[in-house]
Amino acid sequence: MRAALALVVAACWTGADAPITAPVAKPSPPAPVDLRISLERTACFGRCATYNVTIYGDGSVHWHGIANVRELGERKATIPRARLDALAAAVDRSRFFELDERGQPSIEESCTRVGNTTSCNFTNVRVCSDTSHAIVVVRRNGRVHRIDDDHCESTPLARLEDMIDHVGGVERWR
């Protein structure tokens, strides 16, 4: 009887309580950033590279070569999250959303009158030709801002434009 009882106990015993371990989860990719940055370089009277590049918050890059570039048409690539984060930080450093539609710090237009003379600080009157424009559009966190940099005068955007090209890997297609 003792032997039968020992046999029943032995058959039911599973050993010491083993620790319960959860299956190891694979890390999921980071969630897409609410960000879309487009750069369009327009034509000029010479042989300016003409293309569009758009970088999305999931790291995808879309290129469309139009003229005077190595790769015409559509191309796609993906960039690492760290490069996307660096580009987002550059947008912040440039104070992009505070610049006017020409890439200059916003200045309120005003007029003053002295005697019979009125002087105004109109900032949107300028003549410039034969330059390739860089049109940058940033969509971020529900905000959208578009700047058309005609390269007629220095703007805070030149570095950002170059960084968009660099981060997007444009050199392989341009």
Image (cartoon, rainbow, N blue to C red):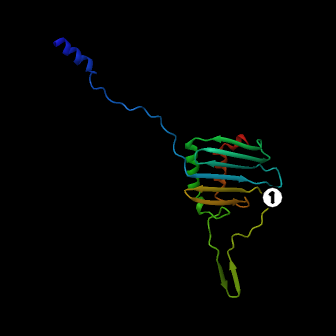
Residue 174 makes an appearance in the image? no
At mark 1, the secondary structure is loop
Identify which residue is drawn at 79% across, 54% down.
Answer: 43
**Residue farthest along the left direction in this orientation:** 2
- Rendered view: 30 above or below 143: above
Q: In this orientation, which residue lies closer to the viewer: 127 or 117?
A: 127
**Residue farthest along the bottom direction in this orientation:** 115
Q: Which residue is mark 1?
A: 130
Q: Quadrant of residue 23?
A: top left
**Residue farthest along the right direction in this orientation:** 45
Identify which residue is drawn at 48% across, 37% down.
Answer: 27
The answer to whether 81 appears left or right of 3 in the picture is: right
Residue 56 makes an appearance in the image? yes
Residue 144 image offset from top left, x and y in percent: 61, 59
Which amino acid is tagged 1? Answer: Asp
Residue 131 image offset from top left, x and y in percent: 77, 57
In the picture, which quadrant includes the C terminus?
A: top right
Q: Quadrant of residue 12?
A: top left
In the picture, which quadrant includes the N terminus?
A: top left
Q: Residues within 10 Å of mark 1 (few under 14, many from 20)?
A: few
Residue 56 image offset from top left, x and y in percent: 61, 48
Residue 143 image offset from top left, x and y in percent: 58, 60
Identify which residue is drawn at 62% across, 72% down.
Answer: 108
